[in-house]
Image: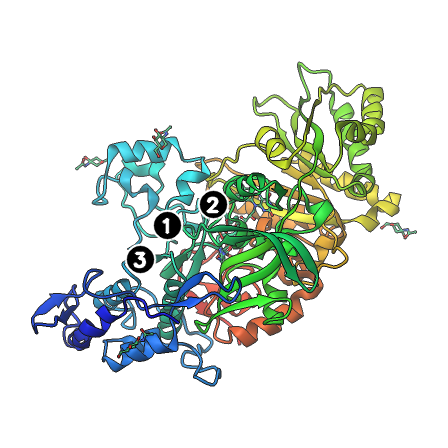
Amino acid sequence: MVALSFHRALLLAGAFAHLGAAQTADSPTILSQDGSLVVADESTVAPAAEAVTDLATDEDKVLLLTDAVVANLTALGLSDIDLFAFGDDAAGLAKRSNTARVGDCKVFPGDPEWPSRLTWTVFDVLSGGALIETVPIGAVCYNNSGVYDAEKCQNVLGNWTKSALHVADPTSVMSPLYQGETCMPQKGDTGSACALGGFPSYSVRIQDVYQVQLAVNFARNKGIRLVVHNTGHDFLGKSTGAGALSIWTHNLKDIKYFESYETPSYSGPALKLGAGVQVAELYAAANKHGVTAVGGECAGVGVAGGYTAGGGHSPLSTKYGLASDQVLSIDVVLPNGRFITATETLNKDLFWALRGGGGATFGVVTSITVKAHPKMTFSGFTFNVVTGAGTKNTEQIFWDAMYAYWRRFPSFSAEGVYGYSMVFPRFDGVAGYTWAFNPFMFPGKTLAQSKALIQPLVDEWTALGFDFTPEWFEHDNFYDAWTRHFPTETVANSNMRTSSRLFPGDIWSNVTKRDAMFDTVKQIVKEGSALIQYNMNPAQRQGTPDSGANSHWRTAQWFAIMGTNWGPDATEVQLESSNRRLTDDWNGRMRPFGPGGYLNEGDVMEPDFQDAFYGSNYARLLKIKREVDPDDVFWAPTAVGSERWDVAGQRDWLTLQTGRLCKVRD
Ligand SMILES: Cc1cc2nc3c(=O)[nH]c(=O)nc-3n(C[C@H](O)[C@H](O)[C@H](O)COP(=O)(O)OP(=O)(O)OC[C@H]3O[C@@H](n4cnc5c(N)ncnc54)[C@H](O)[C@@H]3O)c2cc1C
Ligand SMILES: *[C@@H]1O[C@H](CO)[C@@H](O)[C@H](O)[C@H]1NC(C)=O
Ligand SMILES: *[C@@H]1O[C@H](CO)[C@@H](O)[C@H](O)[C@H]1NC(C)=O
Ligand SMILES: *[C@@H]1O[C@H](CO)[C@@H](O)[C@H](O)[C@H]1NC(C)=O
Ligand SMILES: *[C@@H]1O[C@H](CO)[C@@H](O)[C@H](O)[C@H]1NC(C)=O
């Protein structure tokens, strides 16, 4: 163990006792060595951390909050230091200081228990200046916000649908619906005020593990709502929350390559990824090292954040399983503030739960180590078909062509397929659809092999008179296939909501049931739903340790995302009917065929989310949740164990993150 420039705090922090005496002041002061009062800030007080050798790699140093650091701070009489204490005693037994009763709410701004400005400043100083008071991303467009800036506003407006804009901001979310569409930059000139809405009050910009520990301990000891925010891609509002302290993991960007990495069940190359690494960064690193990594389709999604925590589907999922199946080791800060590593042999329950059991539930993951697979060939096609007036594709031909494709899902999966396509009503308002493949691809196959597999479908399409022009491709590596044949993500449309279903393979062996399922989905698309569909089967592979990932994924052949949208000026009545149609009507009709849904791309109002999002693993996941987080330091809508709390003031057909979080049952 190496003490890290902590001596500055030791020399100076004795005078933090003054903090207690001066609770109304904005700046804490400390006694300097010569006895004069100086402002406590980054230049006078060192971060509350010591450098410890990382268990997983045995060489890297991690900056940790330890018992020794807390003891030093306590001995110095630093004001409010108890707020940073761990949630267990030296013997590892849980201290239950903040057990909420039914009716209690997390401490909210304005409550007498809400930390004073001075206390927040102490937090800021101890975290090395990492605390950020929330300024909504759209505030630069509001001339009454105090930060109005016409040029920055233009940048925000011009880049609004690009994920990079939101990822770079500590609190912006790409489904603004859930923050209550507050302070939307597009409405900056309406004369309204820029309110905080469902945004958290503060964020901590994480660069080292000790900052996560400080935030977790502080939120737990104070009874404040805690949010974990990585890129803000979440579709259910899980990375924002009113009155919360938010842990912003985006800047944990380390990537480390291991040529050979050994676990009881794996031997081969691996990559260690900081919690903030995004899909494009993972793929670039894998390409550089001549290997293939498992990640999502879109460049901006955070690999080690919500994506892998929730399972994570990938162009390689039929071949190698879910993203969570690739994980070999996980570094995580637990609800009690302790930093641990979970592997096949260490902290086994957590290793099981953290792989697929959902984000923001068991702790804050700071890094994961994942398998890297050999470089291989990728081939397939993309196409973009339009139907209806002005095309040869009549409605009948289109649906016949779609059924011809749907019928073949199990046979394509048997060959490792990634079939990703989107069906939307025509964008020009003319009756008909657009159907775009982005792409239909076989990992590990040459173009000749892929063409041979697809030929029977192509023949049937041709016989039906279906007018399509596939653009075939072949690359000797994943990176080129991904950079050239996948769509660019567009985000931040607040007038829509999505849901999803996982349709199991056994339906295909009963033609009556299969066709009834096809008819149901077809009818729902005809009623106006978007259909974003994936033909894939992320089965549990032999040799992969069992995990908490949704059991419904394992048998799925078809992952279908449905979407409802409404106009910008929709009335409350229209909003309600659009949202209820998605949850109750469309999903209600599809659930008998596909009881499962994907928690990362699911309906936040899913009635039996426990079964839909976690399947047969829910009971064990809940048991582990109650053990590691008995007081629900971590909470997110539809997360394991979330049923004990509700966000106040919500309509019963849509939960936003705009109110207090209150305990509703034991
Ligand atoms: C354009 C787009 C494309 C997508 N493509 C795919 C895809 O191909 N495959 C797929 O499976 N999914 C895909 N998704 C869904 C994606 O997996 C989820 O949105 C996922 O939650 C994103 O994780 P994040 O960490 O980037 O986002 P965030 O919104 O920041 O976080 C999501 C959730 O994870 C929690 N979380 C984040 N980091 C941590 C951490 N370090 N420790 C603990 N909890 C954490 C958050 O609290 C929140 O609950 C896509 C989403 C979008 C918007
Ligand atoms: C705690 O303080 C002592 C001096 O009082 C110092 O030697 C030690 O390194 C400190 N511990 C840590 C973890 O910083
Ligand atoms: C997007 O933001 C960048 C700066 O981040 C800016 O240079 C660019 O002009 C913006 N684009 C638009 C269309 O406003
Ligand atoms: C702010 O914008 C509103 C709405 O456009 C306008 O009425 C008002 O005059 C502006 N105020 C200032 C100080 O520019
Ligand atoms: C096939 O599905 C139908 C409709 O769900 C059902 O009634 C029938 O019993 C099933 N047939 C078999 C052989 O399982």
Q: Indicate which disc, 2 or 1, sits on the residue closer to the N terminus.
A: 1
10 Å crowding of disc 1: few (<14), some (14-19), many (20+): many
Q: Which mark is residue 511?
A: none
Quarter of the image for residue 438 reads top right
The label nearer to you, 1 versus 3, is 3
Asked if residue 595 can be seen in this view, the reply is: no
- 15 is higher (above) or lower (below) than 124: below
Q: Secondary structure at mark 1?
A: loop
What x and y, as percent, mark residue 463? 85, 20
Residue in front for this viewpoint, 458 or 598: 458
Q: Secondary structure at mark 3?
A: loop
Q: Which mark is residue 130?
A: 3
- Tag 2: amino acid: Ser
Q: Residue at x 28, y 38 (%)?
A: 141
The label nearer to you, 2 versus 1, is 1
Q: CA distance from mark 1 to mark 3?
A: 11 Å
Q: Which residue is mark 1?
A: 170
Q: Indicate which disc, 1 or 3, sits on the residue closer to the N terminus.
A: 3
Is 444 placed left or right of 74 in the picture?
right
The answer to whether the residues at label 2 and label 1 have Cβ atoms under 8 Å apart is no
Q: Indicate which disc, 2 or 3, sits on the residue closer to the N terminus.
A: 3
- 162 is higher (above) or lower (below) than 604: above
Q: CA distance from mark 2 to mark 1?
A: 15 Å
Is 212 placed left or right of 372 in the picture?
left
What x and y, as percent, mark residue 46? 25, 65
Quarter of the image for residue 549 reads bottom right
| Ligand 1 within 8 angstroms of badge 2 C-beta | yes
What x and y, as percent, mark residue 82? 31, 78
Q: Which residue is mark 2?
A: 175
What x and y, as percent, mark residue 471? 68, 22
- Tag 1: amino acid: Pro
- Tag 3: amino acid: Ala
